[in-house]
Amino acid sequence: MKIQRVLIVLTLANLVLLVFTLARLSPTVTESTAPVLRGRGLEIVDERGNVRASIKVFPASVQPNGEPYPETVLLRLITEKGRPSVKISASEQAALSTLVGPSDTSNTYVQLGAKGTTSSLTLKDEDGREQFIKP
């Protein structure tokens, strides 16, 4: 009889713990998403695992020609064939937005930028025609 009483007490204690645990879990299930997502980069992939969009922070560095390259944030939107068609970059020295033509083109793009105190717009067609606009 003592073993049965012990088993009944343990079962009741387990039920109380289960109810208490479930009662504490329910508020966390109904919480909204986290207010901030933090990281050094973010990639969005399609159903095949190919990166289709990315945003990354690139640290300051020195280019092979010795020119300093500032810390830069770069957003890329990428086509299904893997070509970055939209690029937006920002650094303390410059900001640049580039729209590139379809994957089978090599020279079709629009580039809008501001570097230091100057701004410019470059338009280029696949046939080699280019227009550079600067105020």
Image (spheres, helix red, strand yellow):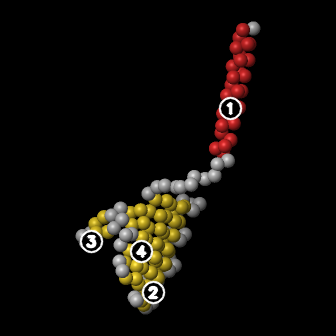
The residue under label 3 is 67
Question: Furthest-left residue in view?
Answer: 66
Q: Work out whether residue 74 or residue 78 is closer to the camera in this orientation and state it.
A: 74
What is the three-letter code of the residue carrying label 2? Leu
**Foreground: disc 1 or disc 2:** 1
Q: Of helix, strand and loop, which one carries label 3?
A: loop
What is the three-letter code of the residue carrying label 1? Phe
x and y percentages locating residue 78 in the rendered image: 51, 69
Q: Disc number at residue 117?
A: none
Are discs 3 and 1 less than 8 Å apart at CB?
A: no
Are discs 4 and 1 less than 8 Å apart at CB?
A: no
Residue 59 found in image quarter: bottom left
* Position of residue 63 in the picture relative to residue 32 (left or right): left
The answer to whether residue 104 is visible is no
If you read the primary sequence from the N terminus, does the residue marked by circle 4 or circle 2 appear first? 4
If you read the primary sequence from the N terminus, does the residue marked by circle 4 or circle 1 appear first? 1
Q: Residue at x 54, y 61 (%)?
A: 45
Q: Residue at x 48, y 69 (%)?
A: 76
Q: Work out whether residue 44 or residue 74 is closer to the camera in this orientation and state it.
A: 74
Q: Of helix, strand and loop, which one carries label 4?
A: strand
Q: Of helix, strand and loop, which one carries label 1?
A: helix
x and y percentages locating residue 54 in the rendered image: 49, 64
**Foreground: disc 4 or disc 3:** 4
What is the three-letter code of the residue carrying label 3? Glu
Image quadrant occupied by the C terminus: bottom left
The residue under label 4 is 95
